[in-house]
Every structure is written in C-alpha cells, then in structure tokens.
Amino acid sequence: MISAHSNKLLAQLVVAIVTLAVLSKAVSGHEPVGRKVQSSTALLNVKAPDFVLLDQDGKSFDSAKLRGKVVALNFIYTTCTDVCPLFTANFAQIQRTLNERGDNVFFVSITTDPEIDSPRVLKSYAQRYGADFRNWAFLTGTEAQLKPVWSALGIRVIKKGRGLVQHTSLTTLLDREGIRRFNHFGEKWQAKDVLKDLVSLLNEKPNHRP
Ligand SMILES: [Cu+2]
C-alpha cells in the first residue's frame, strides 16, 4: 500500500514538474509548439500559402516566383535576442554551402515584427549575417498583409512590447511545387539537418509528387 501511495505521489510530482516546464517555456521568448501540433502531420504535404510582401529593398515580392525552386522559409524579427540570431546564422551557413555547390535553393525570412522591421532595417540585419540577396529575401509588410501568412503557416505572434515579440519557431522546407515537406520546430535544429533535408528535395525530380 505504501509503495502504491508513493507511486501516486511520484506521478503527481512528475505531472507538476512537466506542467511547470511547459508553463515556463510558454512565457519565454520562443513559444514551443504544443505536442499535439508537433506530432501532427496536418502541416506537412500541404501547399504553402501564396503571398505578396515587401522585400529588403522595399520591392514587391510575389511568392509565385518561388515556384520551381526548393525553398527554406522561416520567421524572425531583427531585435530578437533569443534564437532568431541563431536561425539567421544557420541559414547564412546553409546558403553559403549550397551556393558554393551551385545548388538552387531560395531562402525566405519573414518578420514577426513589422512595427520595427521595415525593409531598411531588415536589409542591414541581413547584411550583418552576410546574406546573399540573390537567393534570400527578407520580407515584411503591414500587419494586415502578414497576419494571413503567419496563420496559414501556423505561426502564433504575440506582441509583448516594442521590439519584443513572442513567436512560434518554425523553419519549413518547400519542394519545387510549393508543398511543405519538412518542418523544423523549436530552436534545437542544426544547420546540417536542414541541409540534409534540402539536399533530398533538390534530388527529387521536378515533377515528383509526395
Ligand atoms: Cu526570435
């Protein structure tokens, strides 16, 4: 009986610790995606949304120009001191590696903070990371333009204050037909893992269907 009782206590303790961990994560800068969403395949093998936003030069950027290309897309904001700097550095590293090999992947980073991230701000941010604008666009727009893109890609954005935004961490990889094929959630992904997935998409025949 004692052992059953202490087992129950132990179980309650574990639940409490897990709950605490989840709660403390939820208030940190990068919101984890719930387990339900993470294990769901609903966000895979679906078409990525179409959009028209502004690039780092203030020029209109239509997602139609991505068709026929393998695409790595993520969400960042320039004043993030949490993991966005890591995401951008990883993308820059992957871009350099692929460009040196002559592989044609297009990178897209969409802001989660249009209040601060104007095209000019995004451009100087990108330059600090050595981004090559020939195949990497940093996109912004009005909140009304960005909101449907965020929500179609499952990105929750919560403004905490000026220059402080809580947002879902997602890197999603699209095949040449604009279908979402790989999701890397959270901040633990490594450049080599994303690189491997991109290479597998590059190796697919142009008319492959998942
Ligand atoms: Cu961030």
Image (tube, grey):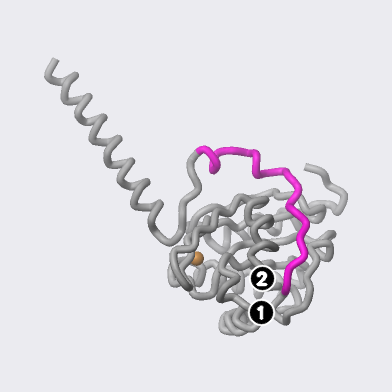
Label 2: which residue? Answer: 140
**Residue 51 is a magenta residue:** yes
Looking at the rendered structure, the secondary structure element under dot 2 is: loop
> The N terminus lies in which quarter of the figure?
top left
Image coordinates of residue 132 in percent, x first then y, are: 69, 79
When the figure is inspected, residue 179 is found, relative to residue 190, above or below; the finding is: above
CB atoms at circles 2 and 1 under 8 Å apart? yes
Label 1: which residue? Answer: 119
Q: On the rendered structure, is 111 left or right of 208?
A: left
Image coordinates of residue 38 in percent, x first then y, are: 54, 43
Judged from this view, the residue extending furthest toward the left is 2
> What's the residue at 79%, 63% (across, down)?
63
The local crowd at label 2, few if under 14, some if 14 to 19, many if 20 or more residues have their Cα within 10 Å, is many
Q: On the rendered structure, is 61 left or right of 92?
A: right
User: Which residue is nearer to you in this view: 145 or 28?
Assistant: 145
When the figure is inspected, residue 177 is found, relative to residue 39, above or below; the finding is: below
Q: Amino acid at mark 1?
A: Pro
Q: Which residues are the magenta region?
A: 36-54
> What's the residue at 54%, 52% (across, down)?
185
N-terminal-most mark, 2 or 1: 1
